[in-house]
Image: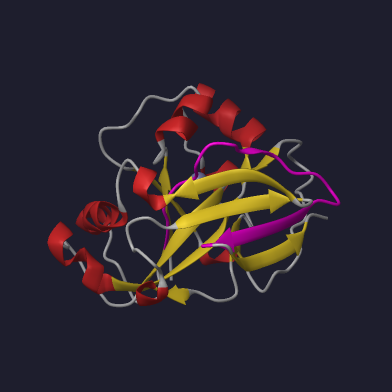
C-alpha cells in the first residue's frame, strides 16, 4: 500500500506557514514503513528538535482506479479515519530553503499515525462537513472541518489518480487545519472524529 498526502489544503494552515494558496493539490508520499498504528507511542527521532503534529482526515481507498473522474470519485472510498502527519519542521524548512525534496522530514519511520478503526461514510451526519480535532494533554490544539478544504476529497482523488494508480488499501491524508506545533516527550495526543475518540497515544 502507499500513503499519499496533501499539503496546504486549508487556507489558515497555508498562511500560518507563510505558504501561497495552491491552485492545484500539493502532493507528497510516505512509504508503508511510516505507519504507526494501534495507539503505539511515537518516539521523537534524535535528529530533530521540532517535530510538529498535523491532524488530518484520512480516506481509505477501496478499489483500483486511474484517471478517476471527479463525479465518480465517491465510488472509490467508503471509510474515513483520522491520524497525524508528523513533520520534522526544522529539517523540512532547511530542505525547502535548499529547494530539495521533503521526504526525510515527512516520510520517516512512524511519521504516519493512523487510528485503529475507520468509520463508514454513511454513518457520518454529512459527508461534506466532517468535524475533527486534536487534543494534547486534554487541551484542544487543532480543529478542522472538511467543508473548509481548498480541494475536497473527490477533487483530491481525481487529481491524485492522474499521476498515481490508486489501489485498495491506499491511504490519502487530506491535509491539516491550522494550529500545528511541536510535540514533546510525555505529551498525550487524542484525536476525535465527530466528537468520538479515534486515537489516543503518547509521545516518548
Ligand atoms: Zn500534512
Residue found at x 68% / y 51%: 135
Tell which residue pokes out farthest to the front in this image: 125
Tell which residue pokes out farthest to the right in this image: 186
User: For residue 46, what is the image quadrant?
Assistant: top right
Q: Nearer the viewer, residue 87 or 105?
A: 87
For residue 191, above or below residue 28:
below
For residue 100, above or below residue 66:
above
Where's the C terminus, which quadrant? bottom right
The reply to whether the magenta stretch includes residue 181 is: yes
Colouring convention used in this rendered image of the protein: secondary structure
Residue found at x 72% / y 36%: 50
Where's the N terminus, which quadrant? bottom left
What is the x, y in percent for residue 9?
A: 39, 41
Q: Which range of residues does the magenta coloring cover? A: 172-194
The reply to whether the magenta stretch includes residue 33 is: no
Q: Nearer the viewer, residue 27 or 184?
A: 184
Residue 17 visible, this orientation: no
Q: Is residue 65 left or right of residue 187?
A: left
What is the x, y in percent for residue 100?
A: 48, 32
User: For residue 172, what is the image quadrant?
Assistant: bottom left
Amino acid at each position: 500500500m502507499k500513503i499519499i498526502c496533501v499539503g496546504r489544503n486549508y487556507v489558515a494552515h497555508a498562511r500560518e506557514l507563510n505558504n501561497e494558496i495552491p491552485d492545484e493539490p500539493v502532493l507528497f508520499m510516505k512509504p508503508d514503513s511510516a505507519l504507526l498504528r494501534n495507539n503505539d507511542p511515537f518516539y521523537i527521532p534524535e535528529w530533530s528538535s521540532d517535530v510538529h503534529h498535523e491532524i488530518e482526515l484520512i480516506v481509505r481507498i477501496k478499489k483500483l482506479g486511474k484517471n478517476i473522474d471527479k463525479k465518480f470519485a465517491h465510488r472509490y472510498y467508503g471509510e474515513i479515519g483520522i491520524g497525524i502527519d508528523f513533520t520534522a519542521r526544522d529539517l523540512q524548512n532547511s530542505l525547502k530553503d535548499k529547494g530539495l525534496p521533503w521526504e526525510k522530514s515527512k516520510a520517516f519511520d512512524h511519521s504516519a499515525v493512523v487510528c485503529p478503526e475507520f468509520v463508514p461514510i454513511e454513518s457520518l451526519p454529512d459527508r461534506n462537513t466532517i468535524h475533527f480535532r486534536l487534543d494534547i494533554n486534554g487541551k484542544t490544539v487543532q480543529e478542522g472541518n472538511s467543508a473548509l478544504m481548498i480541494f475536497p476529497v473527490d477533487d483530491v482523488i481525481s487529481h491524485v489518480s492522474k499521476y498515481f494508480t490508486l489501489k485498495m488499501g491506499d491511504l490519502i491524508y487530506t491535509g491539516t487545519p491550522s494550529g500545528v506545533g511541536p510535540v514533546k516527550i510525555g505529551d498525550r495526543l487524542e484525536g476525535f472524529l465527530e466528537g468520538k475518540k479515534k486515537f489516543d497515544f503518547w509521545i516518548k
